[in-house]
Amino acid sequence: MSIDNTAKRMQEDPDEQQSFLLAESVVTGSPSSFIERQERDGQRQLVNSDRLPTEIIGAAQAEFEALGFTFGEPDPDDPLFRPATLPEGWKREGSDHDMWSYVVDPIGRRRAGVFYKAAFYDRRAHMDLVSLGWYITCAVEYDAGPIIFDDEWASRKAVAAEMQAIRDGHLAEAAKFRGFAANESRSEDNRRHCAEIAQRKETDATKYEAALSELAAV
């Protein structure tokens, strides 16, 4: 399946843009539904294509290639994307957010995030690798599912080290904001807000303590 270059299509045929917006407005009462449909279609097209975004943020292309990704040249008709093959057993999958898709490995872990905004007026795309720290954070703090271990990326030793680092970071942030909350030169509202942040950081740190205890018990 190809990815529709909505920006190019609309630029080349302004009458189509106006007719679509008018039709959607008449049918739904809001032209925004047309944009939402473009974004849903864009995610579906991306997931079912052999393309990935040309722009990589955070990571380097070499990091993707080290995992087994291969990349072609940007599509001359749509340089936002380029042909890409995935490591063996990996696949593209959508999410409940129309602008975010993922590349998952053979055991179901999200290893790369792919952002694609298909709306013709602000069309853009990029991708990044999911770090082990973020994978753990999603599992521990956002209930994204259990951590799935392996011997290469998410070994028990590596996961424990990341958990300890994240916990210590939360505790350091909590101590900093406790200090702000105790500073009488600050306004009462600011001190209360700082105390709330400190409490959240301490609560998050507790989650990692529990996770570390579970990991040690196995």
Image (cartoon, rainbow, N blue to C red):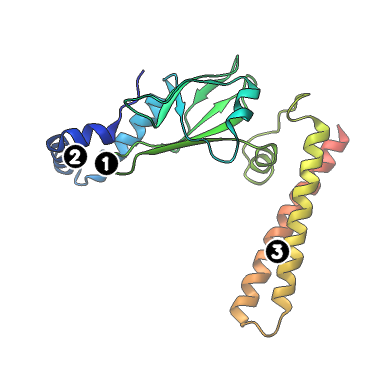
Tell me if residue 99 can be seen: no
The Cα–Cα distance between marks 3 and 2, rounded to whole angstroms, is 47 Å
Considering depth in this image, is 143 or 60 the residue closer to the camera? Answer: 60
Q: Position of residue 155 (x, y in %)?
A: 79, 29
- Amino acid of disc 1: Ser
| Extreme residue in the bottom direction | 185
Mark 3 near mark 2, Cβ–Cβ under 8 Å? no
Q: Quadrant of residue 43?
A: top left
Q: Position of residue 104 (x, y in %)?
A: 58, 25
Task: Identify the image quadrant of the N terminus.
Answer: top left
| Residue displayed at 34% across by 28% down | 78
Local SS, label 2: helix
Considering depth in this image, is 167 or 51 the residue closer to the camera? Answer: 51
Q: Position of residue 191 (x, y in %)?
A: 65, 76
Question: Relative to 125, is 198 on the left or the right?
Answer: right
Q: Is residue 197 above or below residue 170?
A: below
Q: Which residue is mark 2?
A: 24
| Residue displayed at 54% across by 40% down | 57
Q: Which residue is mark 1?
A: 33
